[in-house]
Image (cartoon, helix red, strand yellow):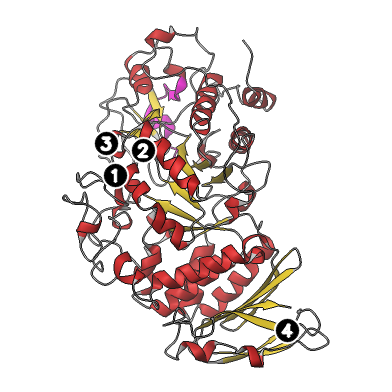
Amino acid sequence: MVRTALTCAMAALGLLSVDGAWAATTAPAAPDAAATPVDLSPVKELRGRSPLPEGWQHGAFIEIFVRGFQDSDGDGIGDLRGVIQRLDYLQALGIKGIWLMPITASADRDHGYATTDYRAIEPQYGTLADFDALIREAHKRGIGVVMDYVINHSAREHPLFQAAAADPASPWRDWFVWNTQPLSALQDWDIWGKTPWYLPGEEVPEVAEGASAPPKPESTASSPAGSPRYFATFGPHMPDYNMRHPAVVKYHEDNLRYWLNRGLDGYRLDAVPHLIENSAKDWNDQPESRALTGAFTRLIQRYPHRFVVCEATAEPKVYTRPEICGSAFAFGLERAVIDAAKGGDGAVEATAKVARFFTEAPLGMATMLSNHDIFAGRRPWDQFGGDEAGYRLAAATYLLLPGTPFLYYGEEIGQAGVAGLPGDAPLRAPMSWTADARGFTTGTPFRPVSPNIATHNAQAQAADPGSLLNFYKAMLALRNTQPALARGSYEAPLAQGRVLSFQRAYRGQRVLVVINYGQEAARVELPGLPARARLKTLYPAAGSTAARPLADAPAAATAVSAASAPTADASGRLTLDAAPRSLQVFRLR
């Protein structure tokens, strides 16, 4: 039997050997294909041409929780047809890529990370035909589509796990990780305050994502001696795959190719540092997990113009290396950006951290203000407490810095989170399209709408030239029309108190960004410019209202007129006045 390239890579690293405390991983005889409870058929690589332009992935993405984006059929649940209906909105916003949170069939019927079938669309979201239509329509608008892929674990309800748990002789038993030691011998295992070892059928209260973990079991009195327990990093409802098993790896390879062959433009690979655990001490971000991630990435990128981004909270800078993932979310940067933009006591330190970040990190990292997980922070509107000036400065910062920016749906209109819901649910409310829920659905929404829907909705903001939505459009227009901002180097970063400045350069084009997070005007010295460079204002544009309300001063107060365009001296230095809480963007010529 011919091994895949990924399996060979695993073997070369010794990934197929197992510590004696773990169940054996010798592959059983191949089961009868007709008896398999899910589609395990091999998928050939079909590398067609991508219709997207080279470099499309350097544009801004938007993360979409399909359940909460747009309902097309009145059942109160967002769906793929709803996403299609809103593609024109995304195109007008300036979006170049969509990240779909899990859309495959799941047991949780909410967040989607408890997968039950990797090759089927979640029925509440639509059909494969709807998926194909979404890819086709997005591509017509120059928008790429990537989706979440959950490698580490399945749902407890996944047919393969159900078969494995029911019969120790099942051919699927070794697809998961088992241990026959009593729980008392496993007390050293502690992942986020809980044991990762569970008995099949054990009733453990399900905890919403982001909520507090249940307490660790204190005894094994109710379990027979030697009863096998399965390993589940994220709780009993999502058992981990045995990623040391060649057949499991091949299953994931085939699933990845299945969607790529349908035209998918790439993946966000979920929780990749957790693919392999070596011991109770060495369970997070093991070398074997990095090797597996790199091999999956290479498989995906054999398809033309495909993009991969990883969730790797442990060492995101490491996972951005091209031999591992190529891009990973820059966790931690979002907190510094928001702290700087608030302009308060911690702003000076945060501004320095923002300025320094991309001098120490790969430029290909993925950036954000928040996402679907509460550990990454509440929605920006809630973090800023309604301070829209600070909100705009934070948005400008991450949209103009290096990296691939990921908006979270509703961020562009200042959608607030829904208080009083458990875990991550406050972040995942229906999108505020109009002043009430009818913009999202003609039925009853699956979750309460945002509390500020009456004032912060897409319909109202589209009609207001000075709205937050139109500010986002202005920032994305800069990124889409200035290659230096989308793909350029990061030069001369400088933090002067609460003022951040940096330059981006690409193929002869150079852009200067100056942001004053402070409540007071500031005069800043800018070294490192080309000698006698003249500055042409890109933002705020003459007569623009999109700068409102960066500060209480009118937009004109932050602009530099063409007639008085600043010029660097012979040594490349320039003195510039920055109005309170202002953004200035210049092209150097």
Question: Whole-Å distance between the Cαs marked 3 and 2?
Answer: 9 Å
In the image, residue 576 sits, relative to residue 261, either above or below, namely: below
Which of disc 2 and disc 3 is earlier in sequence?
A: 3
**Residue that mark 3 sits on:** 204
Q: Secondary structure at mark 1?
A: loop
Question: Whole-Å distance between the Cαs marked 3 and 4?
Answer: 66 Å
Q: Residues within 10 Å of mark 4 (few under 14, many from 20)?
A: some
Please identify the quadrant where the N terminus is shown.
top right
* 376 drawn magenta: no
**Residue that mark 4 sits on:** 534
Tell me whether the residue at label 3 lies in contact with that at label 4, contact meaning CB atoms closer than 8 angstroms: no
In this rendering, position of residue 230 left or right of residue 531: left
Label drawn at residue 320: none
Tell me whether the residue at label 1 lies in contact with that at label 2, contact meaning CB atoms closer than 8 angstroms: yes
Q: Position of residue 293 (x, y in %)?
A: 59, 37
Q: Secondary structure at mark 3?
A: loop
Q: Nearer the viewer, mark 3 or mark 1?
A: 1
What is the quadrant of residue 182 in the picture?
top left
In the image, residue 343 sits, relative to residue 145, either above or below, namely: below
Q: Nearer the viewer, mark 4 or mark 1?
A: 4
Label drawn at residue 235: 2
Q: Position of residue 114 (x, y in %)?
A: 36, 35
In this rendering, position of residue 71 left or right of residue 247: left
Question: Whole-Å distance between the Cαs marked 3 and 1?
Answer: 9 Å
